[in-house]
Amino acid sequence: MIATGGLSHFPGLSLARVGTSDVAFDRGLLGLIETGDHESLCALTMKDLDESGSHEFLNWMVLVGAVSPARARVRFFGEMGRIDLAAIEWALP
């Protein structure tokens, strides 16, 4: 199973941060997906996601729930400046 999509952009949905992303937060999310630490992902709050600009990560969480407890392999991570992108692969039995 493969997923692609955007990660953080417009952190805090504030005009002062339009055109930026939160690379450290995104790398942390991908690390949790790779290690299969779904409990930590589920512990994220809407405030965490909003402040980092990762509000769309909720879409990724649907897929994480579908493939749990599988670990992922990050195939691509792109720091695009105003948005970060990723492509992730899960090997399912």
Image (cartoon, helix red, strand yellow):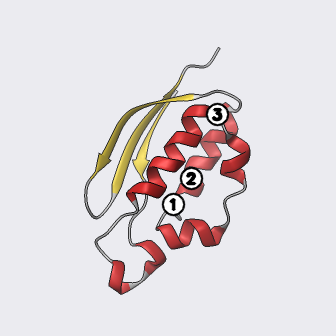
Dot 1 or dot 3, earlier in sequence: 3
Q: Please report contact status of discs 3 and 2: CB closer than 8 Å, yes or no.
A: no
Residue 58 in which image quadrant: bottom right
Q: CA distance from mark 3 to mark 2?
A: 17 Å
Q: Position of residue 36 (x, y in %)?
A: 64, 34
Report the residue marked by disc 3.
36
Indicate the secondary structure of the residue bearing disc 3: loop
Q: Amino acid at mark 1?
A: Glu
Indicate the secondary structure of the residue bearing disc 2: helix
Left or right position of 73 against 68: left
Position of 77 relative to 82 (above/below): above
Q: Position of residue 28 (x, y in %)?
A: 51, 49
Q: Please report contact status of discs 1 and 2: CB closer than 8 Å, yes or no.
A: yes
Dot 3 or dot 2, earlier in sequence: 3
Indicate the secondary structure of the residue bearing disc 1: loop
- Judged from this view, the residue extending furthest toward the front is 24
Left or right position of 44 against 28: right
Report the residue marked by disc 1.
56
Q: Residue at x 64, y 46 (%)?
A: 62
Position of 24 relative to 11 (above/below): above
